Amino acid sequence: MCVLHIEKKTKFDYNVLVTAKVLGKKFPGTFFAGRKEPYQNGEECYIMKRKLWAVMMAGVMTMAALGGCGSDSAGSLDEAKGEETAKTAETSESSDVLRVGMECAYAPFNWTQDEETTPDGSQAVPIYDSDYYAYGYDVAVAQMLAEEMGKELEIHKVEWSSIGMSLDAGDYDCIIAGMGRTAEREMSYAFTDPYYYRYNCIVVKKGGEYENVTKLSDLAGTGCRVTTQLGTGWVPLTEQIEGAQTGTNYETTSECFMAISNGTADVCVVDLPTAQSAALTNDDLTIITFDESDTFQNDDEMVNVCIATRKDDTQLCDELQAAMDSLGWNDKEKMNELMDEVITQQPAAN
């Protein structure tokens, strides 16, 4: 008999770590939302994404179908995983291709477009296994780093909810995707120094009841409905709004802005460049940056935007850092200049 035991949350908010107990024995195995992973006897178990009940129901049905899925030991699983991780790291270190994972749906950091160039003639990058192209601040930085490292750049499009999991699985070698370096993420991944510094803000409906707030405390006790992107460092910031209705968050920032536009939410917590990008194509949004004396606390982790590699892939992380140092990519003025250029190049659909 196979049952599910929810052991703990993963490093991101929207998935859970699931272990199987088979005939009284506990076999560790992580089942990721929206992915299929080999289990015990080589067959595959599926876990549906995001909703806990879906995770549990799909897991129970699939593992029940496997029947004798507990024939191998936990030790053999850990050993196999260790060998696979080592091989993946070795491959990424010796490759002439820099494989980068990003959403391609998070303008102005990264987006998807039909054309191979942007309006100013900048070269976009083909998205792996796709007929589309990617561009944005992340892509421009990745292009510079790949050239400095003497590597070909390969962009992999992935949903934010599985971006870390796909890195662990070896689908690509690093994440350059507007990711904040948090203490929690540093437990699982290696990070470079920041390649961008961003600041947080809120977005509200133009002409709405929250258009004139200037301080965080202005929202206290209003019962406003707050949203942000799932699995980000902004989620804890929403909880700093006293008395707010929280919990309805979305897979992409585009969905968050749509919720503001259609009145499903009142306040979106996000970074300033992303808000500015959205406001270029949506004139019913108002961006508010709080007074420094009355704003979010302990939000430094979302300010530092860094490149992530697998924890054991220190060689690649060091190579990326060396390329950044060689390019002098620690200058905030250079970073802001590139962001100002890129933000004007996004397609209207983004």
Image (cartoon, rainbow, N blue to C red):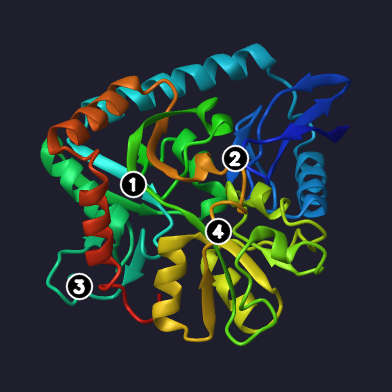
The secondary element bearing badge 2 is classed as: loop
Give the residue number, with chain letter if any, for mark 4. Answer: 291
- Residue 108 spot, x, y in % from top left: 36, 64
Packing grade of label 2 (10 A; few <14, some 14-19, many >=20) is few
Packing grade of label 1 (10 A; few <14, some 14-19, many >=20) is many
Give yes or no for contact between labels 1 and 4 (Cβ–Cβ under 8 Å).
Answer: no
Q: Amino acid at mark 3?
A: Thr
Furthest residue toward front: 293
Give the residue number, with chain letter if any, for mark 2. Answer: 298
Task: Using the rendered image of the protein, determine whether residue 69 is visible from the camera's viewpoint.
Answer: yes
Give the residue number, with chain letter if any, for mark 1. Answer: 196
The secondary element bearing badge 3 is classed as: loop
Q: Nearer the viewer, residue 207 or 121?
A: 207
Give yes or no for contact between labels 1 and 2 (Cβ–Cβ under 8 Å).
Answer: no
How far apart are the alpha carbons under marks 2 and 4? 15 Å
Q: Amino acid at mark 2?
A: Asn
On screen, 330 above or below 53? Answer: above
Q: Nearer the viewer, residue 129 or 283?
A: 283
Q: Residue at x 31, y 27 (%)?
A: 317
The C terminus is located in which quarter? bottom left
- Residue 14 spot, x, y in % from top left: 68, 48
Mark 3 or mark 4, earlier in chain: 3
Q: Amino acid at mark 4?
A: Asp
Q: Residue at x 65, y 50 (%)?
A: 237
Q: Residue at x 19, y 41 (%)?
A: 145
How far apart are the alpha carbons under marks 1 and 2? 18 Å
Question: Is residue 282 rendered to the left or right of residue 44?
Answer: left
How far apart are the alpha carbons under marks 3 and 2? 37 Å
Give yes or no for contact between labels 3 and 4 (Cβ–Cβ under 8 Å).
Answer: no
